[in-house]
């Protein structure tokens, strides 16, 4: 979480510097303290007053500006922060960082800083793809710097290619990743399923449910923050893909089953949070079913119980987590599912409770364990709930 964290935000001379204004605003909204350092080039694109207004702090600019505190500015700022984020980072700044050049306030502070570091490059495609730039980025990565890959698309110069500054939300994710020093799932492979499925009735209509996929995506993100290599099998959702996960998109329950079964053998942790349809039409019409005066009889058949199938094939040492969304007899139904599906933990929620279940930003969960333990979680954001689920799953994996 970024709340209460001290973020040193470096901005260098790219046209993408204007996007740093949104980034600074998002950091402040996340309740982080933000101190901005701008190069002379950055000040040509965005005024320091803009960043000062957004962050509530005077912008640091020159290496030889009047010292306003007892420590030299670049040393004081380097020690003050919890993480040093540079966005956008130009090819010139990347080269300075890689070679240890410290000829302005930004590069001197970078060299002095021993805290976690994140860079988000933005530059012309040819500059980004230059072997020299790639070598410099690789060197920084080897030094432990987190790297937010730029996006591909139309650049300000008119070229089309990779080099556009990554989205603010993704940069915030990587900043949080750098802040997470403990990585309990480092080296682990995690499989997460999320979202609803759609069972075709005809080319126009389908059977589905109200799942938004937010809980599953939050679990995948939490697993990544914990250091895991994550495969996310997602049904149809209106959520942005997670670029740091291996994304597998599916529609139907049958497609979900196939994708999950293919990925399951290589995963040490499986979190089955998708809301898979229990029934699917026996036969989908190849043509749109036209409306008539009478009703329509729709014959359904059960879909495969994916969690139960995974439980039958569970390997020694593999940890499995399921979800139980209920409207009555929550604990009884969840315990039954826990035993019948051969899983290690069930996250149960009562869909009738305000603040729990599909569509919202919060959830209220009760975690039930195969050893009989029960952990009731209060209402919290789905991101917080996902962190608790992953923390408990990591303990199960470690045998604690």
Image (tube, rainbow, N blue to C red):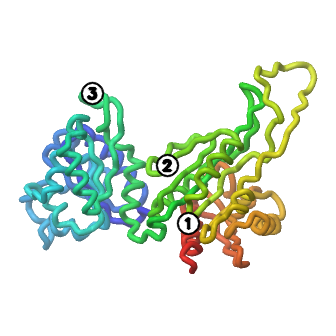
| Nearer the camera: disc 1 or disc 2 | 2
Residue 279 coordinates in the image, percent (x, y): 81, 43
Residue drawn at point x = 78 percent, y = 46 percent: 303
Mark sitting earlier along the chain (3/2): 3
Whether residues under marks 1 and 2 lie with C-beta atoms below 8 angstroms apart, the answer is no
Q: Residues within 10 Å of mark 2 (few under 14, many from 20)?
A: some
Disc 3 versus disc 2: distance between alpha carbons?
Answer: 28 Å
Q: Is residue 339 visible in the rendered structure shown here?
A: yes
* Depth order, front residue of 197/119: 197
Viewer-proximal residue among 226 and 32: 226
In the rendered view, tell whether residue 281 sits above or below residue 392: above
Q: Badge 2 is on which residue?
A: 246
Q: Is residue 212 visible?
A: no
Q: Which mark is residue 390?
A: 1
Q: Which mark is residue 317?
A: none
> Left or right: where does residue 256 sit relative to residue 1?
right
Element on which disc 2 rests: strand
Q: Is residue 141 left or right of residue 256?
A: left
């Amino acid at each position: 979480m970024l709340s209460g964290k001290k973020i040193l935000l470096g901005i260098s001379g790219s046209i993408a510097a204007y996007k740093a204004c949104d980034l600074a605003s998002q950091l402040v909204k996340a309740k982080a303290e933000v101190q901005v350092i701008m190069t002379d080039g950055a000040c040509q694109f965005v005024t320091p007053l803009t960043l000062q207004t957004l962050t509530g702090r005077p912008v640091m600019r020159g290496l030889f500006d009047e010292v306003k505190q007892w420590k030299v500015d670049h040393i004081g700022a380097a020690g003050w922060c919890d993480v040093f984020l540079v966005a956008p980072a130009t090819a010139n700044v990347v080269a300075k960082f890689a070679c240890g050049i410290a000829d302005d306030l930004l590069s001197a502070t970078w060299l002095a800083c021993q805290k976690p570091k994140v860079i988000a490059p933005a530059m012309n495609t040819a500059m980004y793809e230059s072997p020299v730039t790639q070598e410099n980025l690789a060197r920084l990565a080897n030094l432990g710097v987190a790297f937010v890959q730029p996006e591909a698309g139309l650049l300000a110069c008119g070229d089309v290619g990779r080099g556009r500054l990554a989205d603010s939300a993704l940069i915030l994710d990587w900043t949080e990743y750098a802040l997470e020093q403990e990585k309990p799932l480092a080296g682990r492979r995690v499989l997460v399923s999320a979202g609803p499925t759609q069972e075709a009735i005809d080319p126009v209509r389908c059977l589905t449910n109200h799942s938004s996929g937010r809980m599953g995506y939050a679990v995948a993100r939490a697993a990544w923050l914990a250091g895991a290599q994550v495969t996310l099998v997602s049904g149809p959702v209106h959520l942005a893909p997670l670029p740091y996960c291996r994304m597998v998109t599916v529609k139907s329950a049958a497609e979900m089953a196939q994708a999950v079964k293919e990925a399951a053998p290589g995963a040490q942790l499986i979190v089955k949070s998708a809301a898979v349809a229990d029934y699917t039409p026996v036969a989908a019409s190849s043509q749109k079913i036209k409306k008539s005066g009478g009703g329509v009889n729709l014959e359904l058949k059960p879909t495969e119980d994916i969690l139960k199938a995974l439980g039958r094939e569970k390997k020694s040492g593999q940890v499995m987590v399921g979800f139980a969304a209920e409207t009555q007899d929550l604990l009884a139904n969840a315990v039954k599912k826990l035993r019948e599906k051969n899983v290690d933990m069930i996250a149960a929620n009562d869909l009738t409770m305000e603040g729990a279940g599909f569509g919202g930003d919060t959830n209220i969960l009760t975690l039930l364990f195969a050893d009989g333990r029960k952990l009731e979680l209060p209402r919290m954001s789905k991101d917080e709930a996902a962190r608790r689920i992953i923390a408990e799953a990591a303990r199960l994996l470690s045998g604690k």
